[in-house]
Image (tube, rainbow, N blue to C red):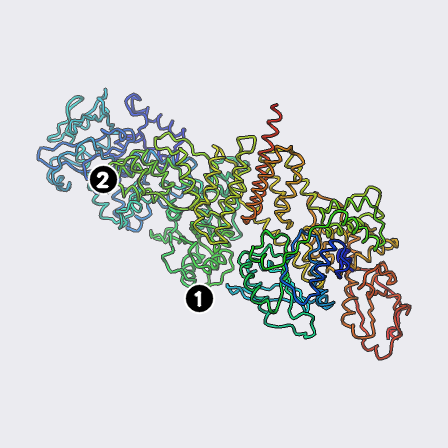
Amino acid sequence: MALWVDKYRPIDSKKLDYHREDAEKLRGLAQSDDFPHLLVFGPSGAGKQTRINCLLADMFGSGVQRMRIHYITFNTPSNKKMEITTVASSYHIEVNPSDAGIYDRLVVMEVLKSIAAFRTPDDTAKKPFKVVVLTEVDKLTKDAQQALRRTMEKYSGSCRLILCSNSVSKVIPAIRSRCLNIRVPAPTEEDITRIVMNVCREERVTMPADLAKKIAKQSERNLRRAILMAEATKVKQYPFPPGANPVVADWEIYLTKTAEVIIAKQDAEQLREVRNRLYELLIHCIPATMIMSGLLRELLKNCDNQLKCQVIAAAAEYEHRLQLGSKAIYHLEAFIAKFMSLYKRYVDNMMDF
Amino acid sequence: MQSALEDISVEDLVYNDDDDFTSRLSKKRKKFHDPKDIASNSRLSLAAFLENNDSDFPLRIAPPRTIPKASFTVSSSDVLKDPLAYAHVPKPTDDRPEDDDLEITEFNQPTQSAEKRVDKPPSHERLPDFPEDVRNDFPDMSIRERTSPLFRKGIPSPLPEIPAPPTPATIPVRSFTEDVPNIRRENLTNTFNEIERIQVFRRQPKSDHISVDSDGQKLYLRFKKKNWQKLEHASFADANVRHTSSQASFHAFRILLDDVRNQMDVDRQIPKDYTPTLPVNTAFEARDVWVEKYRPNRYLELLSDEGVNRALLHWLKLWDPVVFNREPSFMNPYNNFGKRKKKDDKPQFDRRKYGGVSDIFFTVDADKRPKFKAALLCGPPGLGKTTLAQVIARHAGYEPMEMNASDDRTIEIFRNRVESSVMNGNVVSMLQDGKVNRPKCLIIDEIDGAPANTVEYLVKLLKGEARTNPAKKKTKTKLGLWRPIICICNDMYVPALKSLRQSTMVLRFPSIDRSRLVSRLSDICRGMEVQADSSVLTTLCEKSEDDIRTCLNSLQFASVQGKRLNIQEISKATMGCKDNRKQLLKVWETIFRLPRPKPTEFSSTSATDRIGHILQTVQLGETDKIMSGVFENFLIVHHKDSSLHTASECANWRAYTDVMERGIYEDQNWSLLSYLPFYAVAVHLHLGALSTPLFSFPTTHFEAYKRTSQNKETIAALLKDLAPSLYSSVKRQLPETELLPFLVHIIQPPLKSTSLHLSNHERSELKRVVDLMVTYGLTYREERTVTSFHRELLDPQLESIASFPNVQQCPAMQTAVRAMVSREVQLQLINVNARKEDSSTEELADIVQEPVTKPVVKPNEPPGGKNTSKLQVWSVYDYFRGQNPSQTPKPAAADQRTKIWFRYKEGYSNAVCRDIKVKDLM
């Protein structure tokens, strides 16, 4: 028994629901004898991994779905033993090097080397190489990316890489140029509405069209979130009453409330409370960039155009610093303090007029 | 003849400096003197000195080595303050040298005549204040008030304005007396004994007096008329003493001084612990070092905080019943030294009087020993901790036995020393045939540097768990700790001392009162002929942060140059400047506090100086902690501008330093390190205020970090048990933000608590939930809180990730429902496991004993799941009735492999009760 998200995930590229043209091209690629390294990128919930899996299935057949968990151990230079978990079939291996933190460079080299050492045992394999899927490439350190660019070429005889990442901006150009870049854009809201309705029909759940639209809107064009949301909403209240609202993740509500707190009052004490709320969000492993963008979106609702410019400029500055720095709380709070200062001055000016 | 001060004891003078006493004293004076004539504050007159051996005031005279110049110091405070209290004795006719230098420095010793002293064994000389002092050792009044006039009195005052008299070579006075046989010494002495009071004046008094000439300065000594006549009657051969206006060449005094000198010779023959009021350790070899020379020897000379002194002494006194077999002078430990008269008056313990020490430290155990058998003095160096311990131990009648870092402190040596000193439980009688066998008090100095096992041993000893050395088994006395131990350390937060802290009375040394330190320093300066006014000394104290040792060393260093010390030099010089780290709270205070404008011209309040000061402060400390402390506290302080501009700037600075920190720690770019303290500077310039709130230690960040890593571990735990196909999909699904918040909702449908009344729809929901939970490896874990409140928590604890405080979208399932789901999940797990084990066999016979109330999940409605179709649950009934529809008839051979699962649940009463025969089971 699985969640709807997993249950209705297409495993055949013919059954992909949207971006049909791209899917066709990928299928063509899989049918050819060889294919280049791929860099698949696109926003979260757009279906990158699904497409990768479909591609693998096209290439190697259903054998790729027989996966097992592999633990790879290696020694760090400081003689510390590290273990990372990988998922592998006999044709491919899926690694998330950023699990190893600052040792991701070692992971990249170790995995590629071990794959290169053992050629595919199965002579009847359709392709003379194995595929290494590296996920979250944008989280790789610069070191690891530098290590990757050489190994990619060196071991290209025995393996192909499929890199998966949310954004290419953090992937160094050297790697980008070595790969065929495949962008997977987020599905449109119409796509999402359609898919949600389809899933519900399969589940014999009557989904009102307006609720499906609401879900699609709320999900921010993230299909995974939309389907999870639909299931959660169904569990919460079914049959759906008219005008039912989709279930929203707790942290989003918390974020919205935090924005309200910021708007309500601007002084040091309030800032202290906001700080505690920010800490709470960070404790729940919400990525700082999501907090920043979520807050900005909520805060901008209360700004006029002139103020919006300043706020967005400030947000951009602090988001940049956030990337450069290491502890998110400082940057988030600096942004909030800046916003409070701007907003307070703006409100005071309005009062004067 | 009655002495004016005869009935006022020494102790009164020393301890009872209250108003009552002063008035009593002045009344007494009025009886004898015209109030106009006497100096108002003068407590003791010359007569007090001249009344020799039988009086309450033994004459103590410092050896002449201290003052090379001739000086005759009269020890009356007012007269002393007067620079003219300086009587030069003119040359007698036979051209004898007159430069007998005397300083009368102390007179608050208990009654001990010089003659008696000679008779006594020298050992007794070492404890002149014992045991008399013990009676009075808890002064109620501020020691500072009490001691300062005495100190001043005791200071020899070489007066630079007055040139030294021509000093020919000193001829021993003894020869003088031999050479002048015509003066009947005894007569004269007696006469002076009868003179009840001689007072020294600068102006000519109205009544009878004699004048004394000293290098052009004229002083007048006043006598009562009748005494004066007696004095005249004593008929000096060539004394030029005239009535009223005549100049007196003061031979009578010379003879007296000679007497004094004799006594001094006697004193010198006795090697004894010489303690004048200004502590001067003549016994110490390294007397050139001022720090040793002026180390206090008596309780009243201590400079350290009074409350701490008192607390320590009080604690030490609690040992009296065991050590000396006597009650301490205070019967009630809380009673302030018997001051309280009323019996029914509940004694109140005033912590402030005891240096902030809680009163539990002053309780005693069953053996009448104090509950805390050791004291731990801690504080920065140079505050007089070691001195305090030594002095107090001696004061309370112990023999201090010091162990410090210079000793070998391995556990064997330590144990031996401890056993020989403090583990002897015999009560010591203090006076055994005049010889005192004093109990030992172990002082363990610098214990923060001691090896850990030594400290452990000490802790065990304090707790009464320590074993004695097995070699020595003959100890027939009571084992355990029978003598006080005083430990001294600088840093009480050394990890090795952690256990020690809990079993000792911890006394933190506050910094020394600066005015007292300055006055002491100025006394010493006067004694050592260094010219330094109090502002110089204050500056010095400031620089050294009231470190006595540093102050004295710096002074001595300065004195070598022989110049007059001035403020500029002191404040510019690097000497006396301590480079130590400040405590974190102090650092934060420095950052958030504006420097107070100082009256002096050397105040450093310009922005540049402030920046420099802050940089210096921050750079010396642990930058990391300082910064996080500033960040955590900068929103607490007062913000002057309403638009939060300053706060925004400060936060901006913090973000900026964070970027730099990453450069430092990740890219190893250490040259950036020197820019970090500018954050503190920026905060200081933005938010510096005159008053600061109470700072809190920065814990939030660490707590957040802890909880974050906990949550990450939870996710890791969740991922660990997943099937491979699920693993990669869950991993990709950003569990924190997307999967888990919804998963928590999905597995908690609104269900009724009693499963018997579940509708079909609800049953299918339950089935779905159970399947999901099994798939994702979730269970509910029973947890009983302290209040025996029963809870069922998700395991792994996804709720701590997915749920936020005050965000209640859907009410969590009730405990009963969760318990029900939990049972179902366990059941399912057992089934799955059993199937795995028997997966190859054709036979599946799981017998699960289950409670009657358990809803029977029918296998006939698998809601669409692929893998769930394989999962089948049979209830006990079905099996026993043989009604399981899907079960094939068993072959006999398979019976051997039949497994019976029995789950025993404690406290669960509604188990199946049914008569079964064994053959039914076979």
- Left or right: B822, with B4 as reference point: right
Crowding at dot 2, Cα within 10 Å, few <14 / some 14-19 / many 20+, comes out as few
User: Can you say whether B86 is above or below A23 in the image?
Assistant: above
Q: How far across and down, in percent of the image, does residue B727 sit?
A: 69, 61
Q: How far from the left and from the top, in percent, is residue B231?
A: 18, 28
Between discs 2 and 1, the one toward the N terminus: 1
Q: Which residue is depicted at the point 57% across and 37% down?
A: A338
Tell me if residue A178 can be seen.
yes
Task: Tell me if residue B790 can be seen.
Answer: no
> Nearest the camera: A192 or B807?
A192
Of the pair A323 and A18, the residue shown nearer to us: A18
Chain containing mark 1: B
Circle 2 sits on which residue? B562
Horizontal relation, residue A197 to residue B784: left or right: right
Q: Left of B922 or right of it: where is B607?
A: left
Residue beneath label 1, please? B472
* Residue under the point 23% across and 21% down: B205
**Residue type of the residue flagged with mark 1:** Lys
Q: Amino acid at mark 2?
A: Gly
The N terminus of chain B lies in which quarter of the figure?
top left
